[in-house]
Amino acid sequence: MRPFRLALLAVSLAGCVPDAPSTLAPREPSLAAAPGAATLKNTAQPVPWSGTALRDGVPNGEVPECAAVWCDRFDLAIDLPSGAWSNKPGGVEIAVRWSGFGNNLKLYVYRGSARVAASEGIIATAQSVLLPAPANGAYRVYVAYDFDMAAQFGTPLAPEIPYEALAEVEYAPKPQPTRALLPDLQARAQRNVTFDVPPAIFFEAGVPTTSCFPSEIAEEGARLCMRFDQVLANAGEGPLEFRFLLPADPMSQPTGPIEQRVYHSDGSVTSRAGGTWEFHPTHQHFHYTGFALSRLFATDASGKKIGTTPLRARRHRVGTIGAPASTGRKVSFCIVDIEIDAWGEKGDAPRTYSAPACLEPTPGGYLLQGLSAGWADVYDWFLPDQYLDVYGLADGLYVLETVADPDDTILEANESNNCGAVYVRLTGMTTASPHAALLGPGPACSR
């Protein structure tokens, strides 16, 4: 890994848990309970279970991955009807999810002494694997507490991580008619809107008296940053996959083209122009240019959006109702599978795109990034450029909109469902302590 990407990964992980304590109280080691067990008997109903991974649990040592860390074990029997895979390519998906970004678990599946699947990527709240057309029989599922982030980057981790898991049959998209298996990008509702001071991340420390990062102030003229998160999901049949050739010197070649790789139902893969990347020298990483657009609108007394253009957007020139306003493009870093958007639903793929793989060039010198079907990429409020400058705006009710792929550079199945909106109430805007309250889903919107 190149030095600047290794450093980036370190600060990324350190910044993912801004509210976590710097130290954790020691606790008595815990012994493993008897493993849970269940049988997957049909193709329609999943097998759910839950458990808790312990930081200080005694390793059971049953498999190499559990020799030094706690593993929660679940005994899964597969007993599907004969013909379950006849003319229906697919497999059994095994998935686990948890809360608390910055915590991490790993997932392993064994049959006898052989490991048949694993999902180990970091910076996520879910792992998932697919056993292609597995034979009926006994399988062991291990959920391992992950110390890698703490050991390598000093990230504090919780004493225990509760999780939920499931096993279910997933079939591949039907091969006929022959077609492109396209992604379908959708913006999910914001979960946080805040004026809180962001923590140190990407070589930057937050300024104690402002919600803006120094780079946002210096490079973009930000004055009052309303920070928020964005959740961009892929509800399509196929993955969103990008690759781009890394320059030898990103400082002298700061931008370049991106290829979108399109998978087809007959197994073929084609490539097309999918936009551009740019190198951000302050944060020492590569951005996808124009992945999503955020904009803020005023409302009338009934909550109806006023006008057709945003009052203000992230390039920070003040707009007026009905007049063009400057727009800010969300530039994404390291597009990966963060959480399962279609949990317990048919149509989600195993975790395919993860960190740190998204930071490592392929043998041909490409970076490969993407978003699997049924997964979401999450950009938390405390990341750089996750803000709108609301300096000078009055107290009141606003609509915050997010549009995925606003420039239509990505080939996807549905171009009409990319926009999502929430209501936000701003108060104390003329004081030293402004406040933003997230009120819930907003009105229908479009690009």
Image (spheres, helix red, strand yellow):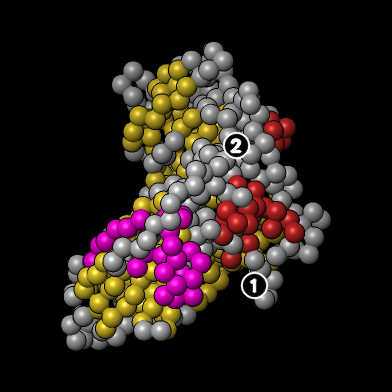
Q: How far apart are labels 1 and 2 at the CA level?
A: 32 Å
Query: Where is 429 relative to 147, above or below?
Result: above
- Image mark count: 2
Q: Callout 1 environment at 10 Å: few (<14), some (14 to 19), or many (20+)?
A: some
Which residue is pictured at 64% across the width and 66% down the height? 360
Using the image as rendered, state which of residue 263 and residue 47 is in the foreground: 47
Tell me where the magenta segment starts and ends, as one range.
Answer: 46-73
Query: Where is 434 relative to 273, above or below?
Result: above
State the residue position of label 2: 199
State the residue position of label 1: 362
Q: Where is residue 336 drawn, in percent x and y?
A: 51, 59
Q: Amino acid at mark 1?
A: Thr
Q: Which mark is residue 150?
A: none
Using the image as rendered, state which of residue 424 and residue 33 is in the foreground: 33
Q: Callout 2 environment at 10 Å: few (<14), some (14 to 19), or many (20+)?
A: many
Using the image as rendered, state which of residue 207 and residue 105 is in the foreground: 105
Query: Where is 234 relative to 158, above or below?
Result: below
129 left or right, relative to 81: right
Asked whether 54 falls inside the magenta stretch, the response is yes
Q: Amino acid at mark 2?
A: Pro
